[in-house]
Image (cartoon, helix red, strand yellow):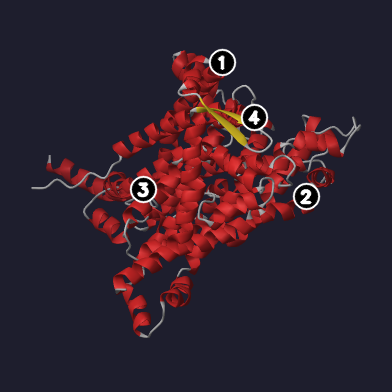
Amino acid sequence: MDKVKLYLDKIKKFIRVDKIKKILFGRNLSDGLILRSIVYLLLISIGFVYLYPMLYMLSYSFMKPQDITNPMVIWVPTELYFENFNKAIITLKYFETLLSSLTITLVPAIIQTIVCSLIGYGFARYNFPLKKTLLFLVLVTFIVPIQVYTIPRYVMFHQFGILETALSIIIPSIFGQGVNSAIFILIFYQFFRIIPNAFFEAAEIEGAGDYKIFFKIAVPLAIPSYITSFLFGFVWYWNETYISSLFLGQDFQSLQIKLAYFVSQFAASYPNEEAQRLNEGIRLAATLLIILPMLLVYFIMQRYFIEGVEKSGIAGE
Amino acid sequence: MTKKTRKALIGYSFIGLWIIGFLGLMVYPLINSLIYSFSKVTITGTGIKLNFTGWDNFVSVFTSEQGFIFRERLVDFAIQLALYVPIIIVFSIIIAVLINAKIRFRGFFRMIYFLPVIISSGPVINELITQGASGSSFIESYGVITMIEQNLPSFLAEPISEMFQQIIVIFWFSGVQILIFLAGLQKIDTSIYEACSIDGAGPWEIFWKITLPSLKNLVLINLIFTIVSLATFEGNGVINLIVENMNNPLTGYGFASAIAWCYFLVVCIFLGIAAFLFRNKKPTQY
């Protein structure tokens, strides 16, 4: 009996179950063979679902009409065909439209960031009557669906005569009522709240006024929050189409609206061209052109999207 | 003037723009919208004319043909919300945990997973879906949908198979949520993990006992964000109906405002449920 036990011990020592278990399952999510392969499998397969539309778009936008109808051509076009982009650029009047698109995205995004930082700072550093209530109302403005108040706003802007001009998009941003402004106010609120008081007290003792303190101390400290807010504001304005299509009308030249009415736009740009019929290639080339500015911004500023969210207090308290 | 009142005034000066905007661009339109919803609104050359009609607009939500379409779309929206929201939350927690782990090419994976944040606009998603680039065809080819339709009762199979067809929409609505969860995960002190694994906790226990509880507060934030962003998404049938009715001479702004308020009520119910389920329970006192 003892011998058997001895052998078993020897075998156990040889196999070292613990070690195998450690290799397979690990102690953390990132080590351990089984878990790690599951993690990578999940990451890659879900990542593919995300990338699929991008790849599809990229591949089709370079295909000749013959390639699109040819079942033998999958993913890789027979040649790089730029005519789709050419047609899409003409139909969208791309460069002109890009400029007017920027006036209703870049401008309000910048204004909104500045205004929201002021508001967030006010809430974070000062005590005044009704502060809690007002802060709660900031949250409420985020929750109320835009549909409830767009109709009267539409009527109001009509009376002011700013409908179908860029002002109808820019004015709300001046007053902290732009696209998701409440979120930016809260980001700045959270950020300014966690700056130690000592910074401000020291400046106050030195005799700096309240506004000087804001510009000289608070703003430089909050640069990452500014960048993050601006980026998200820019992206959200770029992707917002409900209000802009309503307020600006079909005639205003914005890229997103042009994409929404691409079929009729194409017919207007290419009348009587039966042979040059609109196909997926052209439409996807147009779609690609519209997300291209955002992709560029994203690739250049990528780290601010992620670090910014980590540093600014979105996830805080 | 005491220092306190001076400071309060300076505080108001910082948030002044917001107060003006809130009153002028939010409260005033909301009151008007409420008035419209109780009126027949006619557009004249000089402006708009209101005839008070009492509850007529709200009654016609339940009686007229447009009202019927609205109720139908509202039910669709409610089902969509009830299905999508939990999936989006669970999915974004999983992704956030995955890309927070120490993996290779972390930057690359993050870049892919945050793509939706930057390109999810109504026209772009519409274009992708109509041009077949949404990935649903690629899921269909695996026969998942036919399997569901054969094995489940139809009232369940229909929304679920639709959900699979719109999986891309679900994925593409998770960008910001993943970011927020990831930010929350990064705030967990790594020494907690170390302490746990020294005490013999495996990854499974750590996930349920440490990771998930620390994300709990963020779940509510993300729930609110998801509900609101689904509710205001351009592809949503209800909000398109509101615009259609605005321009419809038979119904007009009055009826459009009435259905907008009904819609708001439904959204509020969902937000209320979310807030109730994930409310911050006060620590019990002894």
Residue B65 bears which disc, if any?
A: 1
Q: Which marked residue is nearer to the observer: mark 3 or mark 4? A: 4
User: Which numbered disc flags the more N-terminal residue, 3 or 1?
Assistant: 1
Q: Which residue occupies 27% across, 57% down?
A: B192
> Residue A45 in the image: x percent, y percent?
53, 40
Instruction: Give the mark count.
Output: 4
Provide the chain ID for the residue under circle 2: A
Residue position marked by numbered label 3 in the rendering: B218
> Residue B200 in the image: x percent, y percent?
23, 51
Amino acid carrying label 3: it is Leu
**Quadrant assignment, res A263:** top right
Residue position marked by numbered label 2 in the rendering: A94
Per the model, the C-alpha gap separating discs 1 and 4 is 16 Å
Q: Are marks 2 and 4 in contact (CB under 8 Å)?
A: no
Q: In this rendering, is residue A297 above or below A44?
A: below
Q: Are marks 2 and 1 in contact (CB under 8 Å)?
A: no
Is A259 positioned to the left or the right of A79 in the image? left
